[in-house]
Image (spheres, rainbow, N blue to C red):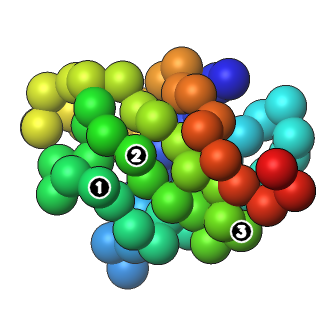
Amino acid sequence: MKVMIRRDSKGALSAYVPKKDLEEPIVSMARPQMWGGLVTLANGWQLELPAMADDTALPITVEARRVAGAGD
């Protein structure tokens, strides 16, 4: 699924899923660099993000895979 990752004015990361019109803060990351690992959203969804360079500019839209989450 397409997911836009962005950083707000306070530096917090969030993920926006256009198809679901869902925006949630990223509350945890399996890897400190985020890319190529799992991130957990505030609603409980876990998304596997693609491997990318650590200095990838945000905002960016990527193809992520939903691994688990509320309602599974």
Q: Position of residue 47 (x, y in %)?
A: 54, 42
- The Cα–Cα distance between marks 3 and 2, rounded to whole angstroms, is 14 Å
Pick the residue in front: 69 or 5: 69
Residue displayed at 27% across by 47% down: 34
Decide: few, some or many residues near mark 3? Use Cα within 10 Å; few <14, some 14-19, many ≥20. some
Tag shown at residue 38: 2
Secondary-structure class at tag 3: loop
Mark 1 vs mark 2: which is more N-terminal?
1
Q: Position of residue 7 (x, y in %)?
A: 40, 59
> Is the residue under label 2 in contact with that under label 3 (CB below 8 Å)?
no
Q: Of the residues shown, which amino acid type is indicated by label 1?
A: Ala
Decide: few, some or many residues near mark 2? Use Cα within 10 Å; few <14, some 14-19, many ≥20. many
Relative vertical location of residue 15 with respect to residue 18 in this rendering, above or below: below
> Is the residue under label 2 in contact with that under label 1 (CB below 8 Å)?
yes
Decide: few, some or many residues near mark 1? Use Cα within 10 Å; few <14, some 14-19, many ≥20. few
* Residue with the mark numbered 1: 30
Secondary-structure class at tag 2: strand
Residue displayed at 65% across by 47% down: 68
Q: Of the residues shown, which amino acid type is indicated by label 2?
A: Leu
Please indicate whether residue 44 sits to the left or right of residue 15 in the image. Answer: right
Secondary-structure class at tag 1: loop
Residue 9 found in image quarter: bottom left
Q: Is residue 69 visible?
A: yes
Mark 3 vs mark 2: which is more N-terminal?
2
Relative vertical location of residue 68 with respect to residue 54 in this rendering, above or below: below
Residue displayed at 43% across by 53% down: 39
Residue displayed at 58% across by 62% down: 41
Q: Of the residues shown, which amino acid type is indicated by label 3?
A: Asn
Q: Is residue 8 visible?
A: no
* Residue with the mark numbered 3: 43
Please indicate whether residue 27 sits to the left or right of residue 55 in the image. Answer: right
